[in-house]
Image: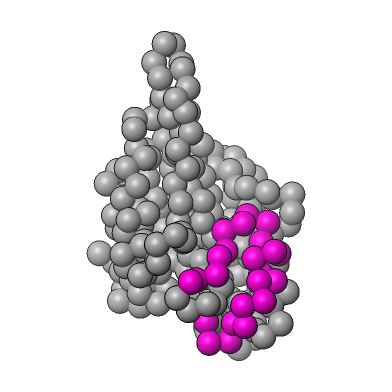
């Protein structure tokens, strides 16, 4: 599978995407850098946790820690029908990432070719400054490497092989849409143009690149 698989409608969503596109590029960045982002369509999510399992397997995530967690809340009752809501908890790949600015060794960085926020475990000294700075509380110390760890959109695994992130590949309902904000013909950009999306903690100015299409109908567990 290739990478071509493809808050609110109108100015808010489009301006948010436009603000992310082309921003934060260094002078020595690649000529055609990408700016990867992810949409979690909660209306399509069924809470199967296939995304969690695929992430753990592909990225060899040790037991006891998670790069990706699916939060399942409920049951709620609508018209006498119990239902659940499903929300993704993982790195937001912020355009203005506080974890990068506080890192004393340069271990936390943004990959110039992809826009992905990542960690170099060989530079990490385990000071945990980045864990404290992350407003989304999604970083952890890997018990094997002893370095800070988190979702990297499978940059060193699936993406390096020309595949989609493991969670996206594993999702049976197409609830996860991964793509390049700089590619205006991508499915991700098309969805941002047409759907009502939200992002968490926008008031903090981090410009997160994990978008959500909020649950509107009862989910299925």
Question: Foreground: 110 or 13?
Answer: 110
- 168, above or below 9, in the image: below
Q: Main secondary structure of the magenta part?
A: loop
Q: Quadrant of residue 104?
A: bottom right
Residue displayed at 44% across by 11% down: 79
Q: Is residue 4 left or right of residue 192?
A: left
Instruction: Report the quarter where the C terminus lies.
Output: top left
Q: Position of residue 43 (x, y in %)?
A: 42, 35
Residue displayed at 39% across by 15% down: 81
Q: Which residues are magenta?
A: 121-143
Q: Quadrant of residue 163?
A: bottom left
How are the colours assigned in the image? one colour
Residue 19 appears anywhere in the view = no
Q: Position of residue 217 (x, y in %)?
A: 43, 26
134 magenta-colored: yes
Residue 162 appears anywhere in the view = yes
Instruction: Report the quarter where the N terminus lies.
Output: bottom left
Question: Foreground: 192 or 220?
Answer: 220
């Amino acid at each position: 599978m290739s990478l071509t698989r493809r808050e609110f409608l109108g100015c808010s969503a489009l301006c948010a995407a436009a603000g992310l596109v082309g921003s934060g590029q260094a002078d020595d960045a690649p000529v055609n850098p990408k700016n990867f982002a992810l949409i979690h369509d909660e209306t399509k999510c069924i809470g199967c946790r296939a995304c969690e399992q695929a992430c753990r397997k592909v990225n060899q995530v040790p037991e006891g820690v998670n790069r990706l967690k699916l939060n399942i809340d409920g049951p709620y009752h609508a018209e006498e029908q119990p239902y659940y809501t499903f929300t993704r908890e993982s790195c937001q790949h912020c355009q203005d990432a506080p974890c990068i600015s506080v890192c004393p060794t340069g271990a936390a960085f943004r990959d110039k070719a992809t826009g992905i926020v990542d960690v170099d475990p060989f530079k990490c000294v385990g000071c945990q400054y980045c864990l404290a700075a992350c407003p989304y509380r999604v970083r952890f110390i890997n018990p094997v490497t002893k370095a800070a760890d988190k979702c990297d959109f499978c940059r060193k695994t699936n993406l390096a092989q020309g595949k989609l992130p493991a969670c996206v590949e594993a999702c049976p309902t197409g609830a996860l849409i991964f793509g390049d904000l700089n590619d205006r013909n991508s499915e991700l950009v098309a969805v941002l143009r047409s759907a009502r999306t939200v992002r968490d903690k926008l008031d903090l100015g981090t410009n997160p690149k994990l978008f959500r299409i909020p649950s509107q109908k009862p989910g299925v567990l």
